[in-house]
Amino acid sequence: MRSPIAHLEGETSLRLDDGVPARLVWAGRRWRVSDTPSRLHARDMYYLGDRLTHLPDVWLGWRFQAHPDDGGEARVFDVIGSAGRWSVAHVFD
């Protein structure tokens, strides 16, 4: 997987079906989740050092692949939730 792309601004809306991401609106485009989303934990997102042996299991959001409704290539999204709002933290092409 390549490095994240830089474009992260814009409103984000995430629709959950049975508690799991199904659709995303981001950067003015609608995206359909096309794989099985994985829970995203703090240890997956941040390097906290080799000396930490018992990291807290803090759930931050979701990682999933999605295809745009208007055509184009799929991307992998890291979406973080906080206080009922969602934001795109990383996008991989």
Image (spheres, rainbow, N blue to C red):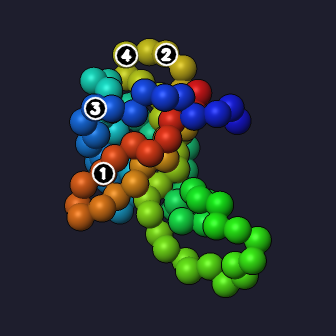
Looking at the image, is mark 1 or mark 4 nearer the viewer? Answer: 1
The amino acid sitting under disc 1 is: Trp
User: In the rendering, at what x and y percent does residue 83 appear?
Assistant: 23, 64
Identify the residue position indicated by label 4 in the image.
70
The residue sitting at 30% across, 51% down in the picture is 86
Front-lying residue, 63 or 45: 45
Residue 33's image quarter?
top left
Alpha carbon distance from label 1 to label 4: 22 Å
User: In the rendering, at what x and y percent does residue 28 appear?
Assistant: 27, 24
Give the quadrant of the N terminus: top right
Alpha carbon distance from label 3 to label 1: 11 Å
Identify the residue position indicated by label 2 in the image.
72
Identify the residue position indicated by label 3 in the image.
10
Decide if residue 11 is in sight here. yes
Q: Residues within 10 Å of mark 2 (few under 14, many from 20)?
A: few
Disc 1 or 4, which lies upstream in sequence? 4
Disc 1 or 2, which lies upstream in sequence? 2
| Residue 26 as seen in the image, left or right of residue 77 | left
Up/down of 74 relative to 82, above or below: above
The residue sitting at 24% across, 55% down in the picture is 85
The amino acid sitting under disc 2 is: Gly
Looking at the image, is mark 3 or mark 2 nearer the viewer? Answer: 3
The amino acid sitting under disc 4 is: Asp
Asked whether disc 1 touches disc 4, contact meaning CB atoms under 8 Å apart, the reply is no
User: In the rendering, at what x and y percent does residue 71 appear?
Assistant: 44, 15
| Residue 47 as seen in the image, left or right of residue 79 | right
Identify the residue position indicated by label 1 in the image.
86
The residue sitting at 34% across, 47% down in the picture is 87
Alpha carbon distance from label 1 to label 2: 23 Å
Disc 3 or 2, which lies upstream in sequence? 3
Give the quadrant of the C terminus: top right
Looking at the image, is mark 1 or mark 2 nearer the viewer? Answer: 1
